[in-house]
């Protein structure tokens, strides 16, 4: 059973940055496609980005391109989501997930999910 843990959430002012990490213990994330998703209060879950295991291909939601970046840190066994120039509308619980398909469709049909990390953007 793959257990994912998100970290790095918190409160940040508009225009600030945060870096979330998705980690797993005892299992390498390198063999999994990893997706990032978010759910804002009162809204449906939204795909943020994903990184493909096979070739490292990265897909980022069109509305977030230029501000959000995804990267793998194989040494730390994490997949990180770098969020820059944050806006109040980025406030949400952010989830990482593993075991799904990663392509430009940014589907959410993943097998394993973390518990989520709260990101609040407010002055």
Image (cartoon, grey):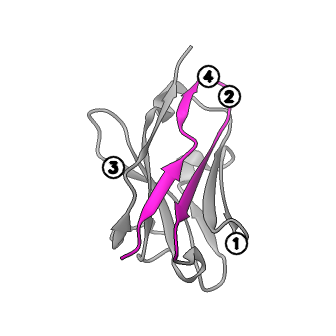
Local SS, label 3 = strand
Whether label 1 touches label 4, CB < 8 Å: no
Which of the 4 image quadrants contains residue 84? Answer: top right
Q: Which of marks 4 and 3 is nearer the N terminus?
A: 4
Disc 2 target residue: 16
Residue 14 is marked as: 4
Residue that label 1 marks: 74
The answer to which image quadrant residue 77 occupies is bottom right
Looking at this view, is 81 or 47 the one in front?
81
Q: Give the range drawn in magenta.
A: 1-26
Upstream in the sequence, badge 1 or badge 3?
A: 3
Ranked by sequence position, the earlier of labels 1 and 4 is: 4
How far apart, in angstroms, are the residues tagged by discs 1 and 4? 31 Å
Q: Is residue 17 left or right of residue 47?
A: right
Q: CA separation, marks 1 and 3?
A: 27 Å
Name the quadrant of the N terminus: bottom left
Identify the residue position indicated by label 3 in the image: 45
* Callouts 2 and 4 close, C-beta under 8 Å: yes
Q: Earlier in the sequence, mark 3 or mark 2?
A: 2
Name the secondary structure under disc 1: loop
Assign the C terminus to one quadrant of the image.
Answer: top right
């Amino acid at each position: 059973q793959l257990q994912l843990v998100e970290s790095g959430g918190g409160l940040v002012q508009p225009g600030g940055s945060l870096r979330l990490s998705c980690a797993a213990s005892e299992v390498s994330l390198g063999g999994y496609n990893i997706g990032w998703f978010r759910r804002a209060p009162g809204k449906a879950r939204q795909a943020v980005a994903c990184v493909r295991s096979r070739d490292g291909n990265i897909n980022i939601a069109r509305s977030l391109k230029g501000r959000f970046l995804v990267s793998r840190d194989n040494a730390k066994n994490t997949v990180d989501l770098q969020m820059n120039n944050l806006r109040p509308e980025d406030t949400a619980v952010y989830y990482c997930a593993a075991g799904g398909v990663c392509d430009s469709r940014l589907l959410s049909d993943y097998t394993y999910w973390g518990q989520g990390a709260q990101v609040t953007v407010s002055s």
